[in-house]
Image (cartoon, rainbow, N blue to C red):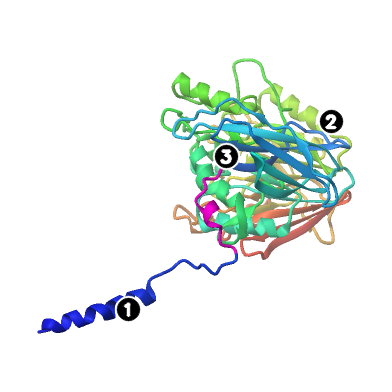
Amino acid sequence: MFGSNIWLLVPVLLLVLLLFWPRKDTRSKDRVPPDLENRKSPFFIKPILQLGNRPKLTASEEVEIHWHAEAPENDWSVQYRQSAQADWKPVPVSRSNKIKIEGHAENYRFSATLSGLLPGTDFEYQVLKSGQLELSSSGLTRKARGQAQRIVIVGDMAEGGPGSRKIAFQIAQTNPDMLLMAGDLVYRTGRLQEYLKYFLPVYNSDTSSKEIGAPIIRSRIALTEVGNHDVGMPQESDIPNLDLAPDLMAHYILWSLPLNGPVTTGSKKHVAPLAGKQERLNAFLQAAGERYPRIGNYSVDAGDCHWLVLDSNVYVDWTDAQLLSWVEADLQSAKDARWKLVSFHHASFTAHWKHFDEQRMRILSPVFERHGVHVVFSGHNHTYERSYPLRFEPAPQSNGKLIADNGHVDGKFTLDKEFDGATKTRPNGVIYIVTGGGGARQKLMSEHPEGKLVALPPFTVTMVDNVHSFTCLDMTANKLSIKQISEDGSVLDSFEISQ
Ligand SMILES: [Fe+2]
């Protein structure tokens, strides 16, 4: 029917294609020059600001910059300054042994220590390779006693969904002085490949937006704790196996934190039951070095607080007298801190049916009360929950143990219901906060198909289980102002504690 007319359509179709074919926008001012566009990044992991093994405050602060690169040549240099008028100060760069984790490019950890920094002040640093600038960032040193500070606390974070990117963006909007990540930083099993895919592009992105995340961990000190997913144990009965996933436990390879945790003797090692061929275990142990397993438990001073971070995973037996005496001694020693704060992943007191049975950390409540701990932060449940100030006296089970086989810890509660965080701000007891809404699971607890909450337990003031959120804590010597902020920036809860 069309006959020879079909050939007339060809030039028309070509014209349409020419007009509507998607083209690269060459007008953008931000367009990368062609010679750099295809250049491979020299970083395997981009620079991260790290506190390192510095639990105590000093008049002259230090921070470390860590990054990983595949090339062994140490032609890196780092320089920093504390004001735009100051001269850049070069610092030596050191290199680790080769990190050889199966499934990943062989790489090296490079690090530089910036020293002689004033507490609580901004600085700039630059990382250069063969004299060429590769990354520049601002940074902030830890606050000293008497300096106001803002700390963001959040757990249960990077799973690849939009929630974690929105949360990272909103955290950056609050401009915290420090970040504390309350476990389950990356899903599903804390593998290095999961960090590379889900966590680092979100919390160490080059740009800041709701759709991407923010360059937080290159500019602020982040403290971390291990959750069950960080050690390859989505379920308590799981045994992490390096033969199945050789890049498990990346937490211990990436983070550099105080090494002042307990060293126990005896048969109980309080470490994850890691399995796998010896060569894979050796590769992990070499990459982790002294961090494993010691950064599971540590304490740190910052501003007016002393912060105790504990590993609450099921393999740690907190009835062990050696561990308990370390906790007692640590809290006892923090005499000059105005505030004592504690965090661990598995909440002692949660309102939610999910993980409700995992109550084992309740046995530490009397220790916290004895030493005047003000707030305990946890994650694990993807909720925000705030308790009344409470005192809890564990009672032995019928078999004489404090922890029942099902994980329950029964006991006597004393609740301070006078405290309202507005007009009555001096709590009689410890306030327990669950802040596990960091973005993991696009389905939050409220949408979980396995069950619904029927009623809040008596110790709960409020619970939010239908939106991602994080905790923003403003601290002065006499007051803690705590806000829970959602992924869209709205305030879900706020209260104050004074002394
Ligand atoms: Fe968890």
Q: CA distance from mark 2 to mark 1?
A: 79 Å
Disc sitting over residue 15 in the figure:
1
The amino acid type, in three-letter code, at marker 3 is Glu
Q: Nearer the viewer, residue 291 or 433?
A: 291
> Which residue lies at the image location 57% right of the left edge and 36% below the top edge?
69
Q: CA distance from mark 2 to mark 3?
A: 29 Å
The amino acid type, in three-letter code, at marker 2 is Ser
**Residue depth check, mark 2 versus mark 1: number of the one nearer the observer:** 1
Disc sitting over residue 358 in the figure:
3
Q: Tell me where residue 190 appears, x and y as whole percent.
A: 52, 39
Query: Badge 2 is on which residue?
Result: 333
> Which residue lies at the image location 53% right of the left edge and 26% below the top edge?
284
Q: Regarding mark 3 in the picture, which secondary structure is present there?
A: loop
Q: Regarding mark 2 in the picture, which secondary structure is present there?
A: helix
**Residue depth check, mark 3 versus mark 1: number of the one nearer the observer:** 1
Task: Give residue 489's quadrant in the image.
Answer: bottom right
Q: Tell me where residue 432 appears, x and y as whole percent.
A: 70, 47
User: What segment is highlighted magenta in the picture?
Assistant: 30-43
Q: Are marks 3 and 1 in contact (CB under 8 Å)?
A: no
In the rendered image, the vertical position of residue 401 relative to residue 179, given as above or below:
above
The quarter in which the N terminus is drawn is: bottom left
Q: Nearer the viewer, residue 373 or 163?
A: 163
Q: Tell me where residue 458 appears, x and y as whole percent.
A: 67, 52
Q: Nearer the viewer, residue 49 or 42?
A: 42
> For residue 366: magenta?
no
> For residue 40: magenta?
yes
